[in-house]
Amino acid sequence: MSEQQNVVVVGLGYIGLPTAVVLANYGSQVIGVDINEANVARINRGEIPFVEPGLEEQLARAVAEGTLRATTEMPAGDAYIVAVPTPFKDNYEGDVSYIRAAARNIAPQLRGDELIILESTSPPQTTRRMAEYLIELRPDLSLDGLEGKPAIHVAHCPERVLPGKVMEELITNDRIIGGMTPEATRRAQALYATFCVGQLLPTDDVTAEMAKLTENSFRDVNIAFANELSLIADRLGIDVWELIELANHHPRVNILQPGPGVGGHCIAVDPWFIVSSAPEQAQLIRTAREVNDAKPEWVVQKVKEAVEDKAVPVVAALGLAFKPDIDDLRESPAVGITQALARELPHGTVLAVEPHVADLPPALQGLKNVRFTEVIDAIKRADVVVLLVDHQQFTKLPKGILDGKQIVDTKGLWRPTRALGAPVTGAMPMVTAAH
Ligand code: SAJ
């Protein structure tokens, strides 16, 4: 693949940096661009600005071999990969301002014949709008090579890697390659083929955008189903985890797990891009988002009910991360629940436990009645223990430590196990008086 040796990666975050590193180690000459000067300096020293297994060694190698360098100034290149954030605005529409800013910086560098790939998860038709914006800024170029104007080749190739396994999944995952033209698809396939051993599935740009959003919406809708079941089961006084386990014995049923809500920066965000692009049609996807977003408040109410008779309640909130066994607290329902408990129980104390971080996150710092506490100490002091994340650590508690405590177990981690098929011995409501 000689025609695209100079690759510019725009945005050196959780996706852009690993992508730049992998490209550099698989034969491309890569320049990474980011507005964060401190991170650019760090990367040029071979140091990573965030934790991702395997990234540091590979970055150090690319920097040492001179195949990757970082800068704050947009250079010229044969191919550009845009991997900038696409958050959502207050009205749930996708905020594409970082993509437009990237396009504004790329436009003056173009000579014609470049490949420009958008990797950021984006609302449908964003790639198209980015391409039109580039042509607006550079009317001497075109998207089709007609009228004697040199063409630029634009594609959407969404990232689908799982945080924590990025370096592996970048190489092994299949990829969707959505070119605006067959030539753009062909060139993007050739670029990803330099490092990706998965299938490179050709399609158009809008289908590629929707495929990424659809994957995360599928998961969101299925988690919402589990979360709704947890509310129904609680009302009926049955154990939702047993219910799901039994239903999943059906050969065509595979229900996900309920929890305190859906966190992270993908699944709780991406479905809104579909909803805002087709609000009348996206009924189920919207409702699923609402069901999942309402779950934290339901958990807060359960804790409040459990401490009703306590003049000065002490609540141990176990876990702050957005999923088990990681240190990532972004968009975590556990943080929101802990914050709400502190607000709604001003006369009480919330003992926040998170074994994967060194201190309380900014959202909880400065709250007078929240204390960052070690797990055993927190449980011993608490009237109510609310389990928010099913970290490994919380499965290995000393025997009897939960005796006499009120428990709100949002992950079913401490439910008494009952052999399937054994007679039902009693309902296991969400809140129990003792364990
Ligand atoms: N969750 C549940 N119940 C479940 C499964 C998950 O409540 O049965 C919760 C988790 O606790 C967490 C949230 O959902 O709060 C999301 O976690 P996750 O592990 O489902 O997904 P993410 O956000 O870490 O990564 C997802 C992945 N997408 C899919 O699995 C379809 C990943 O492959 C994507 O690359 C990533 O989003 C992304 O960047 O879009």
Image: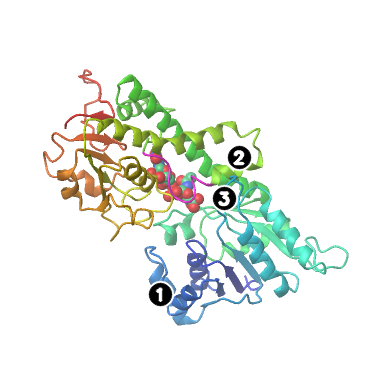
- Asked if residue 254 shows in the view, the reply is no
Under circle 2, the secondary element is helix
- In the rendered structure, find residue 409 and report the number of the disc placed on it: none
The answer to whether the residue bearing label 3 lies less than 8 angstroms from the nearest atom of ligand 1 is: no
Task: Specify the color scheme.
Answer: rainbow
Residue at label 1? 47
Kindly state the secondary structure of the residue where label 1 is placed.
loop
In this rendering, the label closer to the viewer, 3 or 1: 3
Could you tell me residue 281's position as x and y percent?
A: 64, 33
- Give the amino acid type for the residue marked by disc 3 in the picture: Phe
Viewer-proximal residue among 281 and 151:
281
Amino acid type assigned to the residue bearing label 1 in the image: Glu
- Quarter of the C terminus within the rendering: top left
Residue at the disc numbered 3: 88
Packing grade of label 1 (10 A; few <14, some 14-19, many >=20) is: some
Q: Is residue 409 magenta?
A: no
- 42 with respect to 78 (left or right): left
Q: Which residue is at 82% across, 67% downward?
A: 139
**Start and end of the magenta stretch?**
260-269
Q: Is residue 335 left or right of residue 210?
A: left
Question: What residue occupies the far top of the structure in this picture?
Answer: 423
Element assignment for label 3: loop
Task: Pick whichever of labels 1 and 2 is earlier in the sequence.
Answer: 1
Mark 3 to mark 2 CA distance (whole Å) = 12 Å
Few, some or many C-alpha atoms within 10 Å of disc 3 (few <14, some 14-19, many ≥20)? some
Q: Measuring 48% from the left and 72% from the top, which residue is drawn there?
A: 25
Residue 329 screen position, x and y as percent: 38, 53
Residue 337 visible in rendering: yes
